[in-house]
Amino acid sequence: MALLTLFLSIWAFRKSRHGRTRLPPGPRCLPLVGYLPFLGTDLHRSFTELAQIHGPIFKLWLGSKLCVVLSSPAVIREVVRDQDGTFANRDPTVAALVYSDNANDVIFGPNGSTWRMLRKIFVREMLSKPNIDACYPLRRQEVRKIITDVYSKVSTPIDIGELAFLTVFNATTSMLWGGTPEGKKWSATGSMARDEYSQKHFVASITLVTLLLVIWAIRKSRHGRTRLPPGPCGLPLVGYLPFLGTNLHRSFAELARVHGPIFKLWLGCKLCVVLSSPAIIKEVVREQDRTFANRDPTVAALIMSHNANDIVFAPDGSTWRMLRKVLVHEMLSNRNLDACYTFRRQEVRKIVIDVYSKAGTPIDIGQLASLTVFNATTSMLWGGTPEGKEWSISLGAEFRAAVSAFSVLMEKPNISDFFPTLARFDIQGIEKETKKISLWVEQIFDSLLEQRMEVNAAKRMNATQKDFVQSLLELRDQQGSGSSITLKHMKSLLLDIVAAGTDTVSAMAEWVMGELMRHPKVMQKVYEELKSVVGLNDIVEEFHIPKLKYLEAVVKETHRLHPAAPFLVPRSPSQTSTVGGYTIPKGTKVLVNVWAMQRDPQIWDRPLDFQPERFLSNAEKVDYSGNNFMYLPFGSGRRICAGLPLAERMLSYVLATFLHSFEWKLPFGTELDLSDKFGLVTKKSTPLVLIPTPSFLVIWTLAKPKKQMASLPPGPHGLPVLGYLPFLGTNLLTSFTKLARCYGPIYKIWLGNKLCIVVSSPSLAKEVLRDQDTTFANRDPSIATLAVTYGARDIIWSSYGSSWRILRKLFVREMMSNTNLAACCNLRKDEVRKTIRDISSKVGSPMDIGQLIFLTEMNVVMSMLWGGTLEAQKICMTGAKFREVVSEMNDLVMKPNLSDFFPILARFDIQGVERQMKRLYQRVETIFDGVLDECVKLVPADTEETCNNKGRKDFLQILLELKEQELGSTSISRTQIKAILVDIVIGGTDTTATTAEWLIAEILRNPDVMKKVQDELTEVVGMNNIVEESHLPRLQYLDAVVKETLRLHTPVPLLVPRRPSKSCTVGGYTIPKNTRVLVNVCAIHVDPNVWDNPSEFKPERFLCHDSTRYDYTGSNFHYLPFGSGRRICPGIPLAEKMVMYLLASLLHSFEWHLQGDEVLDLSEKFGIVLKKRTPLIAPPSQRLSNMELYA
């Protein structure tokens, strides 16, 4: 037995060595004896039958001897003619060596000088024509003797073969030595020798096969004590290994057809159970998920994962649960993946530009996808490309090679895995090679982690750009938490993400491209969808992906036909259990053959056809969650692929980008081969090579020289000095939208000497407003705004810093707090009721809705500013003075000013804007000083007591109290108080009044919406009641109408301009320090790639189940009416209350309609606040029957 084991090990080692080269096909063989037992006696017939199966050239093992058989003229010609010198040697048997005197003859002698000498003698001397003619009498004599002998045996049976042999033998020997020695005795001796040789051919092989059968029978009877699943018979020791072939998924599918959906087979000493039906698989991955939650790692996998200390191979337990929690909830959470989108986008764009530079030349799609995914993944790991250029060129390439080598070693059959007792010898050297690569990768990770820890210690890490490594290091520092991890865990997780993520996603990308090339109609549908969703003037962003339904179906269908991991990751039960009525012993390797199940004709209609449409009808039922056991490309249960969120994003994003940016075709004369090659990840057996042709979009948007990768964004050419100013027109929104169609979602324009960058896509807006919020936290105020805000000492225009933080803190926490707004409720109510009374006295008369709402808003704001301190008469006088100047201030702020575009001309104030604003500023200053002096006199020392007595505290009262806190952290100056009051008056009146006017205009154009709003008011408020602020939370439809109005008519369409405090990169382009950055939220709000039917007024879109996504917090970058980030509008709480309360009151108390046949004009007049070009005039009519409600 020991000897047999040794031979078996040598055989496996030699076979694995040969596995590195591409040998011809051939039949399956047994260990040691090879194909000897199956040959039979007629080798020529056996070989002919084998050639019919395996082709004109095939291999077979005869014992430990590799034999190749040729049987076609073309192949034979290659050997005997084309490569005659290479194949000129012989392969003599032992007997041949003996009788040829150790191959010193013409037949068996090796090609060389001796053989050439012998052949020369043989051909030119012995067998020359003269010599053969000279020997003719000898041949004639021997043939005549045979004729005489046959004549004497006429009518008796004669062995023709023996007769012919004797004739030729005698004739030949006669020519050798001139006659027949010893006559008849010589003939008998020759015949005997021939018979003896033919009788001894199979003795050794028969003996060996008999011995193996006996051992196998003993072993089988011993395992018969438990009811294991059925399965094929194997050989002793090696089990079924010799019969498997190279494509295990296909072999196992064939075995399943014979033995059923659950069967066993022995692979060496390892018991393996294969499952291939949904019902059986459900028992393992759902019903007994905990029992089968362990893995069965190979020797190479254990080394690579630091002894199974990773997420893939770790056994089920507290450590694995901690690692999964870290990976799923921290590293691969939607929030973190969104934050890392910039890294993915940047790497994908680099690859597209690289492909563009190789347009028209063949490209290996698998290698291209692998490089793309690898670069994107590593960029997310440590926040970009570490060590700059050095990493990307040398170290990065070596790292990719190491990851690829890991995959090869993991897939390679290893004797140590099948025969654990031989693991210590590492016969194939796999363990040694894996340790070598693992050590190198570990050194790389150690260096990167050490570098990052030094950066963290110096506190130089940008908090807004948190990559995977940063997340892990923060968790590592939480030593007392349940999610703290060690450096070993960190390195294992990082390698899991790189190795598993790169291999599977790139393989699937290649399969998808291959299937699309084989199905041009499907390819055309994908192109059409990309054209519809993304457009020809835009580039693919991740927010487009959810809308690419057909591409999603194509990916799902590819996952069905070509699952990345055909057996998933092997499971191993932690205890003996029962599945499908059969016993599964503890420690068994359990394989789930999803490849076979997803091609089962009993489950799928026409399973071998590529039909993405099958996933369009029931897309929700067939997803990647693992709940549908007919479709499990990523597994199911607690051990489902943890990297699913990242894999899904990366695959769709890479494919959509490749397909949208290029058209692909096969090289001329190339046939598409979609055969597969089995491994841990199933790949194409031959690489997919395609030729890209760039689309028009790539040529203009992405095709930039490498040295310009960090250049400014594209943009239109302007005139010298003036830039693009002469071409803008009056409506900047229209101009900016047209420019975005030409130059993409980020572009530059020069306005005089001022560089301006316009951003108009959600992903780029996110980069500015969220990812690099601190960098873009400064404003870019105009000359007019500086004058009116006391040199930008207010909340809106002041630069980011400690002073701004103090102002915002007191404004949000003190003035805009829920408590204070609730305390001011009566002030708002009084002013709105005054407006209702005033309108009721003018029923039937046309009214300017915008002016009406503006006056109401102004009165409300004045009342909230100092309504709790000043007397009513003084409030009215102050409000009247303000109304006179606010409108003029807004006009001046919106007016284009040469001093803003040409700062060098600011001292001359050519248009007089600064002088006019200063005059208005002096009037505002006089008003504020008077009010402040009056309030200081009226406010007693005990402010708290006064507040309690009056029941409310106005804004001015709060500001004066904070001013008295001279040493406090929130103390402010008199100038800052006046600047804040300007913000509230101007910002709080114009924007809300404009929104309310737009809303009434839209519902006048959409009577159905008006009816739904008033029906809701009737139901919630009642016809015998007036609107109170307590009713507002229940007015859901009115809230949706307000949101839809803000979407179509955003009050500040470009938000407040931002200015980076340092040069930075957005969308792969450089944004220089102090550039004016405009976020075109109007373009985002009407983008057909983001919104369905964006030009339609449909409030219902905000009533869907996920309506909470569309609020005013700035978290959803598809909807930003008030901005986002730290410079989001601080007055949202007041604006939201005022708009809803005022509109609800107007629509509940009155019916509104247009005059006669008047056509409603919804054209816009651009400015900092987007207003209607023509005022909205509408006569009101009384809606409530109770006149007391108007009193």
Image: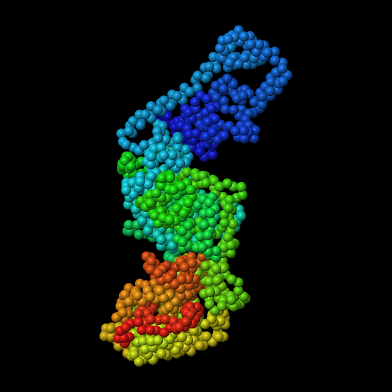
> What residue sits 60% from the left and 56% below the top?
358
Residue farthest toward the right in the current orientation of the protein? 130
**Vertical arrangement, residue 190 with respect to residue 884, above or below:** above
Query: Is 200 left, or right, of 137 in this rendering?
Result: left
Q: Quadrant of residue 1177?
A: bottom left
> What is the count of numbered marks?
0
Q: Quadrant of residue 1132?
A: bottom left
**Vertical arrangement, residue 595 with respect to residue 29, above or below:** below
**Vertical arrangement, residue 1173 with respect to residue 626, above or below:** below
Q: Quadrant of residue 220?
A: top left
Query: Is 1026 left, or right, of 776 in this rendering?
Result: left
Q: Residue 32: x and y, percent? A: 46, 30
Q: Residue 1186: x and y, percent? A: 30, 84
Colouring mode (rainbow / by chain / secondary structure / one colour)? rainbow
Q: Residue 259: x and y, percent? A: 39, 37
Q: Nearer the viewer, residue 623 or 1008?
A: 1008
> What residue sits 56% from the left and 76% below the top?
728
Residue farthest toward the top in the current orientation of the protein? 152
> What residue sits 35% from the left and 31% below the top?
219
Q: Nearer the viewer, residue 458 or 255?
A: 255
Quadrant containing the N terminus in the rendered view: top left
Q: Nearer the viewer, residue 1144 or 1181?
A: 1181
> What residue sits 39% from the left and 49% below the top?
630
Quadrant containing the C terminus in the rendered view: bottom left
Q: Residue 823: x and y, percent? A: 30, 80
**Vertical arrangement, residue 575 with respect to residue 471, above or below:** above
Q: Can I make out residue 498 in this image?
A: no
Q: Can I make out residue 1051 in this image?
A: yes
